Image (cartoon, rainbow, N blue to C red):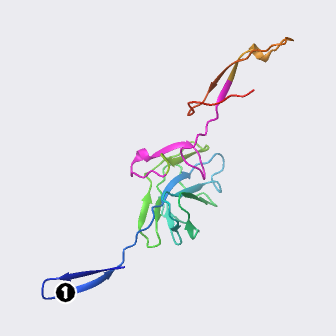
Amino acid sequence: ISSVKVSDGSLSDTKLITIIIEPKLVINEFESNPAGEDSGNEWIEVFNPTNNTLNSSLWYLKDLSDNIINLNTESINGNAYYLINLESQVLNNDGETLRLYNSRNELIDETHLLKDEQDSEFSWSRKPNGNDNNLNEDWSLQKQTKGFTNDADLIPPVVTLISPVNNYISEVNEVRFTYLATDNLAQNFNCYF
């Protein structure tokens, strides 16, 4: 609370004003078209990208059809994720927009119209994690990272045996292997036998 005093030299007025600074909370990832049955398998992840705990009581989301989805949690720790598992099919696969509101009904965050027709384990994710530039490019349809950073490496390294051919080893005292190891992100990694 702060006071503001205005004066014209002879008359003055003072008003008390309240300034509320809330930590930022973002819609970070959502699954609108999971593999198989949608009902009971859709979910939304919100992320607190700050170091401060956020009082999230009475916060809620609205979808494109104005369905209200309550966060149902009193607080979200700093640099933490909060998952909302939807009990029924709520989200639209043909195009969905989510809007996040605080306890004063103020719009805090929203997605663009995003479409998921894949019926798969792919979800809409902010890239990089928690990034909010209000651009379509903030979002990527990728393998879901529910409850983890959206920048997680989800593709395991691949080892391909080149020789011995057909995994055949004759009765010799010395065995030589030739292999190729690749990874989508790692520049260096170790292989053990």
The reply to whether residue 1 is in sight is yes
Residue at 57% x, 42% y: name it.
118
Q: For the residue marked with disc 1, what is the amino acid?
A: Ser
Q: Is residue 27 left or right of residue 72?
A: left
Residue 11 drawn at (x, y percent): 15, 88
Q: In the rendered structure, which segment of residues is drawn in magenta?
A: 130-159
Outermost residue to the right:
171
Q: Is residue 163 left or right of residue 73?
A: right
Residue at 43% x, 47% y: name it.
138
Residue 124 drawn at (x, y percent): 52, 47
In the rendered view, would you say 165 is above or below 15?
above
Q: Residues within 10 Å of mark 1 (few under 14, many from 20)?
A: few
Outermost residue to the left:
9
Residue at 60% x, 57% y: name it.
89
Q: Which residue corresponds to mark 1?
A: 12
In the rendered view, would you say 148 is above or below 107?
above
Q: Nearer the viewer, residue 150 or 39?
A: 150
In the rendered view, would you say 145 is above or below 5?
above
- Element under disc 1: strand
Q: Nearer the viewer, residue 141 or 163?
A: 163
